[in-house]
Image (spheres, rainbow, N blue to C red):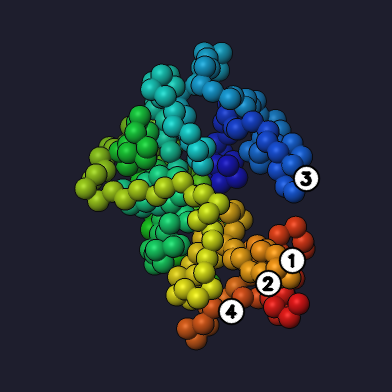
Amino acid sequence: MAELKRAGFLPALIITSPDKPKGRGLKIAPPPVKLWALANKIDFIQPENFNLQFTTYNLQLGIVASYGKILPAKILASFPKGVLNVHPSLLPKYRGASPIQTQILNNEKKVGVTIMLMDEKMDHGPILASRELEASSLNNQIPNNKELSKKLATEGGKLLAETLPKWLADEIKPIPQDDNQATFCPKITKKDGLIDLNDNPFQNFLKIQAFVGWPGAYFFTERNGKKIRAIIKIAQFENGELKIKSVRPEGKKEISYSQFISK
């Protein structure tokens, strides 16, 4: 959104998810997009479903980014210039619910963003533009989920800002995706974060980086006859070894790994 604003594009209406419980206290909190809409004095709605009417806004073009829901055909058809999607992968690879995590898990060296014209199928529509990026960060480390998400969101916003005027001027011909090259990324579940510290250390490191935030990579251990879960907060991969720096035991504050194993 910030990149679009810098380019002079502000939406007439923002559609975002409803407020939800968040954090350990499960307090009701607004999504970040709602806060951005309030700060920029833009109308917004937070529908539970898509029984919506947009006629009062006279909307011509829709843009979707990280919304997490498939839009029904009647919504797509209500925009004369279509609905564009900013997708954090080089389509047709990594369609689905977890493209960023899956690219990290696969140790992709080349990542990227795609602007596509949405149809009724998930991440299936024709491509308007794409941009390839190096996955590694400045220190040549494998990025974690939050780092790569931020990087791709920034580049996706820039690419969208470049693409919009060309699309509105009918200067872009959509290119159909090659379905034979498509790969699908399933939805991440909490159990995906479970790791065995005896498994391949590099694969474990990739899981730790992929699942930063949620669900978090975690392992179980026993203390005084009780099974406890520890979420790995910071780790590094050096000289073929996984080095855990800090963990958060379930229900407690983050501590160094050396403190945790000495207890």
Q: Residues within 10 Å of mark 3 (few under 14, many from 20)?
A: few
Q: Three-letter amino acid code at disc 4?
A: Lys
Q: Amino acid at mark 1?
A: Glu
Give the alpha-carbon distance from disc 4 to disc 2, as whole Å: 9 Å
Instruction: Tell me which numbered mark, 1 or 2, is placed earlier along the sequence.
Output: 2
Say which element carries label 2. Answer: strand
The residue carrying mark 2 is 246
Image quadrant in which the C terminus is located? bottom right
Residue at 37% x, 51% y: name it: 94
Q: How many numbered dots are placed on residues in this image?
A: 4
Question: How far is the residue under mark 1 from the one under mark 3?
Answer: 17 Å
Q: Earlier in the sequence, mark 1 or mark 4?
A: 4
The answer to whether the residue labelled 1 contacts the one labelled 2, judged by CB atoms less than 8 Å apart, is yes
Q: Amino acid at mark 3?
A: Gly
User: Element at badge 4?
Assistant: strand
Mark 1 or 3, nearer chain start: 3
Of the numbered discs in the image, which one, if any, rests on residue 118?
A: none
Query: Residue 84, located in which quarter of the rendered image?
Result: top left
Question: For mark 2, does the 10 Å Cα neighbourhood hold few (<14), some (14 to 19), or many (20 or more) residues?
Answer: some
* Amino acid residing under circle 2: Ser
- Say which element carries label 3: loop
Q: Residues within 10 Å of mark 4 (few under 14, many from 20)?
A: some
Identify the residue position indicated by label 4 in the image.
Answer: 243
User: Which residue position holds label 1?
Assistant: 254
Tag 3 residue: 25
